[in-house]
Structures are given as structure tokens and as C-alpha cells.
Amino acid sequence: MKTLLTVFRKEFLENLRDRRTILSALVFGPLFGPLLLALTLQLSLSRNEAIADEPMAVAVTHAERAPNLMAFLRERNVSIEEVTLDDAGARAAILDRAHKLVLAVPEDYGARLAAGQPAPLRLYADSSDLFNDRVGDRLRTLLSQHAQQIAQLRLLARGVDPLVIAPIAVQDVDVATPRSRAVLALGVLSYLIIIAMLMGGMYLAIDATAGERERGSLEPLFTTPASRSLIVYGKVLATAAYMLISLVLTVLACAIVVRWVRLEDFGMSAQLDASTTLALIGVTAPLILTGAGLMTVVASFTKSYREAQTWLGVVLLVPTLPLAFVTLLNLKPTLPLMAVPSLSQHFLMTALLRGDPIDPRAVAISVGVSLALGIALSWLAARLYRREAILG
């Protein structure tokens, strides 16, 4: 134990003087990541608020053919710009971004409407433009409301109660809490925490293995009376310590900056209080040993600092890869999936942010598998560093 702590202290203190390690462990991930998250959320919410409040501009060709419809749209804060465009011109105006939406009123619109027949309208929009597509959805909703009003007036004119055509009335009951709705905006928080945690120990893992081999200091270190296994375990623990520091700082920074985002204005509430913050750190911390062991194993196969930096940059994607399948496959938290490191941490963090009850069995599986895998990877790293070929 004394040898292990000596190696740990050596690596920990030496890397405090390494600017790259300090910047990655204490600045880039823990500081810039949460700030970028808060800024992105604030800009997104502000943009959605502006879209909801600003008048909707619609270019209408032959607006004179539908005066009642134009009056209906103007009453609902829709800005009508009368244009004269044929089919090709309307398509070109959308593709050239001259207009967001073009509504074309056919020549027989009024006649078909008066005859009680379906009156066609042609709406030109670009579905590949996500921002304009949301504006198009608002216009389609208004047009549907206008059509419903006309249908009700037709029924009243014929002495028929409009309720006849509404046999079912669906009443939406939203049971989501402000805290659970906030997860929609904070969906990337788990990914940010995990990637910042791993980056916190990456440069130490490189310097303590490939860096020492490249400088020629690894061979003298292995000639000391301490066993190679203890030396490697000390390096793994030092890497894990920097990851833990990065994890704590990242979660604390997220808890602070999220308070600046006006989630309450949109019916959301991110309650990152002290207990939730500690719980987020607690459920993520077991992944640290897995990350430290994996990086040490990969670094053992590299010959130089630059090569190790390249490979470990790719290795950073491995623990976060399962998170990419959550949305793609619509994965739900189950006990078997809690045995997948990083994925189980994501499920637990999401449950904490939502305020959902957590199954103790899920926590036990997540912690047990993550620690077991970390111990196995650390043992494998120690075995690899027993080879004489490791000295180059």
C-alpha cells in the first residue's frame, strides 16, 4: 500500500505542473462544457420564444380570391404579403430563400367554396429547413381552424348541430412535472458529464505511460524494488483521481450555470440541488475506474506521446458510444441494460434529473459491473506492463 500511494502521489503531483493536464481536467471540460450547454439552451429557448411571439410572414399569390381567409389570418397575427407568382416562381422563391412560405389561391377557390366542394390551397415550403418547417406547421394549423369554422357554419345553415361531427372529444392530461420536462432540454447533460470526466484523465494516462516511455524514464522506474504491477496500479489511480476531480467540477459547474437558464418561463424546472448533485456524482463515479483502466491498456500499445494522444482520442468515443443508441433505438432502462457501462450511468442520471424513483437493483448492477470492468482492465494493464517489450 505504501508503494502504491507513493507512485500515486508522484504521478498526481507531477501532472499538476503539466499545463495540458490542468487545462483538460480543470478548465476545458468542467468550465467550457457547462457554459456552452447553458448558452445553447438559453439561445434555443429565446429563439423559440421569439418564434412564438413574432408575426408570421406569408407570401400569398392571388390573395384577392380569398378575402375571408386573409382576414382570418390577419386577425391571428399573420403578416400577408401579396405577390404574383406562378408554380415555377413560387418554387424558386422558396429555394432562393426569398420567402419562407408561399400560399397560392387557385382561380376556382371561391367557386368551389360557394358550391360546398373542397376548395384547394397550395402551400409551398421547404421541409428540409427545420426552422421554416415549424412556421409552416403553424400556418397549417390556422388553415385547419379556418376550414373547421366553415364546416360548422355550413352545418348551422342547414339546421344541423356542429357537435354531430365531433362524436369524440379528446382531453389531453399532461402528467409531466416541470422537473421531468426539463430533461427534454437537458438531454445532453449526461453525455457532457461523461466526456468531460474522461478527458480529465486522458493526458495523465498518456504522460504516465507512453510519455515516460518516450522520455526514457519508464525503464529506470521499473528497475526500482517496487513491482511493476503496483507501479501501474498507482498510475491508474492517479488517472482516476484526475477524472474524479473533473467529474466533481463539471457537475458543480452544470448545477450553477443551469440556474441562469430561464427554464421556468417554459414550464420546466431543473432542480440541481445539493442532494441531486451529489447523487449525480455518486452514480457516475464507478465509471471512472473503467475509463482509467481502458486508457492505460490502450496507451500500453503505443510507442510515442503523439500516437497515444491519437488513439486515446478515439477511445473517448467508446464509453460514450452506447449513448448514441438511446435515441436511435428508443432504449428504456431495464436491468439487463444496466450492465452496460456509461449507458447505465446515463439512465441513472436521467432518472435523477426527472425526479423518478430509482431501483436499488439498477444501481447495484451499474456500480458492480463498472467497478468489476475497471478492476479487470487495471489488472490487464498490469499484465501488459510486465512484458519486456513494453520498454520499446
Image (spheres, rainbow, N blue to C red):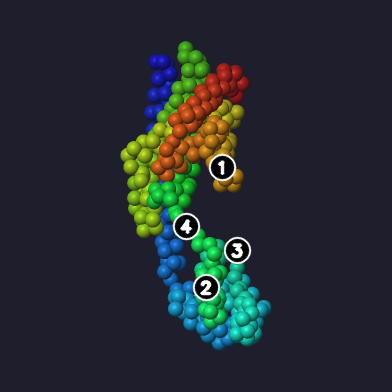
Instruction: Work out whether mark 1 precedes mark 2 in sequence or the reverse, and give the earlier one.
Output: 2
Q: How far apart are marks 3 and 2 (CA)?
A: 38 Å
Kindly state the secondary structure of the residue where label 1 is placed. loop
Q: Distance between the residues labelled 1 and 4?
A: 25 Å
Between 378 and 272, the one lying in front of the other is 272
- In this view, 255 is above or below 224: below
Report the residue marked by disc 2. 162
Report the residue marked by disc 1. 331
Amino acid type at mark 4: Asp
Left or right, residue 30 beside residue 319: left
Instruction: Work out whether mark 3 precedes mark 2 in sequence or the reverse, and give the earlier one.
Output: 3
Residue at the image position 52 percent from the left and 74 percent from the top = 161
Callout in the foreground (1, 4): 4
Residue 193 is situated, as x and y percent measured from the top left of the image, at: 45, 41
Amino acid type at mark 2: Pro
- In this view, 384 is above or below 90: above
Callout in the foreground (4, 2): 2
- In this view, 319 is above or below 106: above
Residue at the image position 44 percent from the left and 30 percent from the top = 360
Q: Which quadrant: the N terminus? A: top left
Q: Can you see residue 205?
A: no
Which dot marks residue 128?
Answer: 3
Callout in the foreground (3, 4): 4
Contact between labelled residues 4 and 3, with CB atoms less than 8 Å apart: no
Amino acid type at mark 3: Ser
Contact between labelled residues 4 and 1, with CB atoms less than 8 Å apart: no
Instruction: Work out whether mark 4 precedes mark 2 in sequence or the reverse, and give the earlier one.
Output: 2
**Quarter residue 243 falls in:** top left
Contact between labelled residues 1 and 3, with CB atoms less than 8 Å apart: no
Contact between labelled residues 2 and 1, with CB atoms less than 8 Å apart: no
Q: How far apart are marks 3 and 4 (CA)?
A: 30 Å
